[in-house]
Amino acid sequence: MFANLAQAEAFLTSRRHLGIKPGLHRVQQLLQACGNPESRMKSIHIAGTNGKGSTSTYLAKALTYNGYKAGSFISPTPGGFLESIQVDGQWISEESFVAECNALLSTIEEMDQQDNHPSEFEIHVCIAFSYLAKQADISVIEAGMGGRGDATNVLHEPLLSIITNVGLDHQRFLGDTIEKIAEEKAGIIKAGAPALSAVTQDGARAVIENQAKAAAVPITWIEVKDADRLQINPQMKGAHQRVNAALAAQACHLLQEMGFSLDMDKVKEAIRVAQLPGRFELVENTPAIILDGAHNAEGIAAFIGTVKENYPEEKIEVLFGAFQDKPFAQMIRQLQEITTDITLTTFDHPRAADIESLSEAYTAVEVTGDWQEWVKQLYKDYKTDTVYFVTGSLHFIYQVRNYIVQNRKMW
């Protein structure tokens, strides 16, 4: 049994080496041990290559503003395991997290003995579902990867299924074409749950449309013009965020039609003020440091568009770190559209691309093995006409964010 949060977190982190394990049988076994909370949850399920966390945040905020106890499960977050599980914006407490871990421990040990090891993410999902089933009126659940085989897809009867967008990511698990990836993400669409999506590619749309027809549910398509029509202006910057906001607003409209009491003026205000760390986040004014969690080619393209929209005249410098399994050479080439002042680095994560791999992929930029020293030096030698961006990986920018927050007063 775990006596405190540190022990529980260490146990979960020790399972990170198991990696990504698609399939539902392990998580189903774990959920059975805690009384199948997924069958008692009112939920909204969100999948997509990018934008899941932002859309989830907008939607949960809108529900809270309308008096519902809104649960959310978003991963990753700067606050780690606790911040990923929230009700009305409040993290799960250390005591509750440890208690939920302890409730699962004997089942995890039995599964380990059977060589049927549940992953870190699968256990995290079960902790979230068990807690949210007891604490929330409605929970917004973000899929980890894909959809069909994702651990979150044990949800029996979601109220809505949302697919934000589809891009080339996690091809080793999801397939090597947009259509194959769309098919995996469309696996969250279920009978009785109307679907929404902001997918733009014709092939991906056709796949999702077919899944909606097979489930006999309507699907609503969202575009940038819908955000403009709804006059939604979220504080989180970028055209992609306006689309995410429109998805959340339309989801609320569908919930209204189902009988949920929602005031659309409150919905719009909630979406306007909603914030999620690491989404084009100005974490420091002097020097001007912005963190953005773009972690694939599509994300970098959206990031570049947002930089151009908001900083058309300023000089730009970028600190970049990425996972080994991402198309980092392509992402670095994309960044050269806005600047040639790019520094490549690695960070503390088993999937992080190392300096050698980054250097081999692209030699025309600077490299550093110590991003903390780079950040510290920036506070001493920054240029007032320059905006400094950190991007390439959510896990990386959260490490940078925590480092800045913890140390800025000393610099």
Image: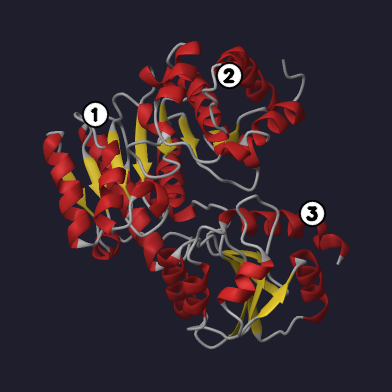
Position in image of residue 46 (x %, y %): 36, 42
Residue 319 in sight here: no
Quadrant in the picture for residue 146: top left
Q: Which residue is mark 1?
A: 259
Instruction: Tell me which corner region of the image, top left, top right, bottom left or bottom right, holds residue 211.
Output: top left
Q: How many marks?
A: 3
In this view, the mark in front (3 or 1): 3
Residue at position x 46%, y 21% from top?
A: 133
Tell me the amino acid under the disc marked 2.
Answer: Ile
Check if mark 1's residue and mark 2's residue have beta carbons within 8 Å: no
* Percent coordinates x, y for residue 6 in the rendering: 76, 30
Tag in front: 2 or 3: 2
Residue receiving disc 2: 108
* Direction from residue 407 to residue 295 in the image, left or right: left
Q: What is the secondary structure assignment of the residue under circle 2?
A: helix
Mark closer to the observer (1, 2): 2
Q: Earlier in the sequence, mark 3 or mark 1?
A: 1
Q: CA distance from mark 3 to mark 1?
A: 45 Å
